[in-house]
């Protein structure tokens, strides 16, 4: 094989590795060229309260499922809120709107793991 082909292949692989590493590090650190203005992470949830059938909130220190507009939970879980990440605790504190039962089950599985 000619030397220039080996060199071209090596350069191509090296550039791909640098690009991949930059993308991975940027994803981990959140470096996308923008910095949060207040130093806080702002999380936006795709479902609004108007579209929701259920709301996940904290109740007696655990994650609970509420029907929209109700003050008593439909279902209590044994997932302690204190063990969750700060961002998850903040979402639950505000009330996490959920559109259907499948989404409730998915979120509870994620929060419980």
Image (cartoon, rainbow, N blue to C red):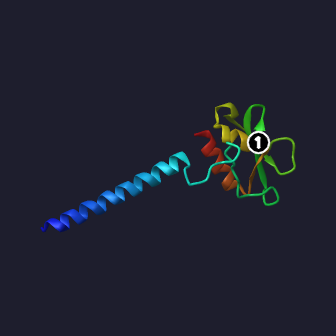
Q: Is residue 75 visible?
A: no
Residue visible at 65% across and 45% down in the picture? 108
Q: Which residue is mark 1?
A: 57
In the rendered image, which quarter contains the N terminus?
Answer: bottom left
Residue visible at 71% across and 44% down in the picture? 38
Residue visible at 66% across and 55% down in the picture? 102
Q: Nearer the viewer, residue 65 or 40?
A: 40
Q: Nearer the viewer, residue 4 or 13?
A: 4
Residue visible at 31% across and 57% down in the picture? 14
Q: Position of residue 3 (x, y in %)?
A: 14, 65
In the rendered image, which quarter contains the C terminus?
Answer: top right
Q: Is residue 38 visible?
A: yes
Q: Position of residue 103 (x, y in %)?
A: 67, 54
SS at circle 1:
strand
Q: Position of residue 24 (x, y in %)?
A: 46, 51
Is residue 35 found left or right of 94 in the rendered image? left
């Amino acid at each position: 094989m000619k030397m220039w082909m080996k060199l071209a292949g090596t350069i191509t692989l090296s550039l791909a590795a640098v690009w991949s590493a930059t993308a991975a590090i940027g994803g981990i650190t959140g470096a996308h060229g923008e910095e949060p203005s207040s130093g806080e992470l702002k999380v936006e949830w795709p479902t609004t309260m108007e579209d929701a059938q259920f709301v996940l909130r904290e109740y007696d220190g655990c994650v609970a499922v509420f029907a929209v507009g109700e003050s008593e939970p439909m279902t209590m879980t044994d997932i302690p809120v204190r063990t969750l990440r700060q961002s998850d605790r903040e979402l639950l504190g505000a009330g996490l709107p959920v559109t259907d039962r499948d989404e409730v089950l998915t979120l509870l599985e994620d929060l419980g793991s």
